[in-house]
Image (tube, rainbow, N blue to C red):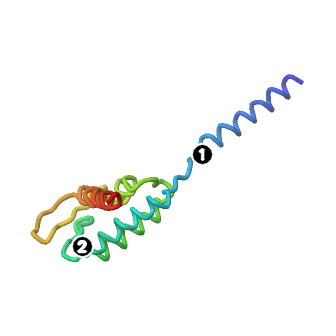
Amino acid sequence: MNTLRFLQALLAAMAFGLCAASPAHATPSASEQRVIETLIQRVASQKSMKFMRNGEEHDATEAAQHLRAKYDHFKDKIVTAEDFIRLCGTRSEVTKVPYKVRTADKRTRNSSDFLKDELRLVRRQAKA
């Protein structure tokens, strides 16, 4: 009888451990989803800017489409707009090469810096 109880307790503990070890799925709040969508729209509006991924230039529309596709892919790991920038707007998942942006005046910077600046503007405008 003690062996049976021990096995039942062991199975229950193992089942609990499996449940506890399974990853939780994050979901951005409705307000964070709006902020993320606003960031993507702001990228799409940057007609004079070039976005560089893995050494290739892309226009604003292509960059926004790529960000949206990555957002759809990583949505269960994203809670905040900062998560979105880190997971979707910073670097290639395949090559690990950082994404860059080139402005109309030919200055190049990391896309994550550009997106963080845009996020600050979005949040500031939301408070106004």
Q: Which residue is at a point 34% across and 57% down the rendered structure image?
A: 127
Q: Earlier in the sequence, mark 1 or mark 2?
A: 1
Please name the residue shown 24% across and 55% down the image.
Answer: 113
What residue did someone put label 2 on?
A: 46
Q: Farthest residue in the right direction?
A: 1
Q: Residue 64: give x, y in percent of width and height.
A: 34, 71
Instruction: Give the quarter of the figure containing the C terminus.
Output: bottom left
- Give the residue furthest to the top: 2
Q: Is residue 97 visible?
A: no
Q: Looking at the picture, how far across and down is residue 78, in whole percent?
A: 45, 55
Image height of 29 relative to 46, above or below = above
For badge 1, the amino acid type reads: Ser
Side of 76 where 41 appears, left or right: left
Q: Please name the amino acid that badge 2 sits on.
A: Gln
The residue labelled by disc 1 is 22
Q: Residue at x 31, y 61 (%)?
A: 125
Left or right of 111, for residue 23? right
Placement of the N terminus among the 4 image quadrants:
top right
